[in-house]
Amino acid sequence: MNRRALWRRLALACGLWMPLAGRAASEVRPWPAGRRAPPLALGGLDGRPWRLSDLKGRVVVLNFWATWCEPCRAEMPSLQFLAQRHAQDGRLVVLAVNYQEHEARVRRFLEATGLQLSVALDRDGAAAKAWTRRIFPTTVIIDASGRPRFTVTGEYDWAAADADRLIAPLLKAARR
């Protein structure tokens, strides 16, 4: 990796990268062809276990984040909007996977912001390592068959038309 790409990646991870338009940088990429979905089995903040295998038949928006990450915090309200928008039909699950933070810190953050997302705890960071380049936020969109389709790196507006264009075709294919 060249020096410029390394600095850009570091700046994006720290929430410092801003394109000329003044919006936070995000990059949407297809999931690498031939790469299988890593296993996912995490404990939820509510005590519920989260396993990717249990979510088959539903589109999953798997968001990796941390409370110290400014782009993560900025993105969370639009993730909640996405979750609420699709709550009735049951074809979409938004799961926010917190990276290596203590449960009490995550709870304080959610209480202070009023966010009501489903949260899983990646206590040792193994899930983020398996699923992402450990740039936060990173979101993986998984189709109803359990196959990852896209990776979105950086802050993204999940309430925007671009998000609908990513997710709508997957929802059409999801049963329910």
Image (cartoon, grey):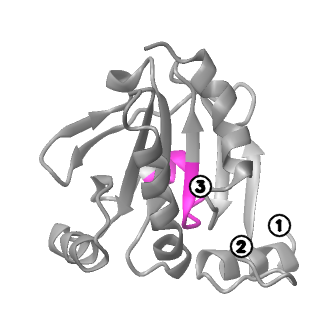
Looking at the rendering, which quadrant does residue 105 occupy? Answer: bottom left
Amino acid type, mark 2: Arg
Q: For the C terminus, which image quadrant? A: top left
Q: Residues within 10 Å of mark 2 (few under 14, many from 20)?
A: some
Q: CA distance from mark 3 to mark 2?
A: 22 Å
Q: Which residue is mark 3?
A: 158
In the rendered image, residue 129 lying in the magenta stretch gets the answer: yes
Callout in the foreground (3, 2): 3
Give the residue displayed 40% in from the left and 47% down from the top.
84
Q: CA distance from mark 3 to mark 1?
A: 30 Å
Amino acid type, mark 1: Met
Q: For the N terminus, which image quadrant? A: bottom right
Q: Which mark is residue 9?
A: 2
Q: Nearer the viewer, residue 68 or 95?
A: 95
Give the residue displayed 86% in from the left and 79% down from the top.
4
Image spot of residue 123 (x, y percent): 27, 59
Relative placement, left or right, of 164 versus 134 is right
Q: Residues within 10 Å of mark 3 (few under 14, many from 20)?
A: many
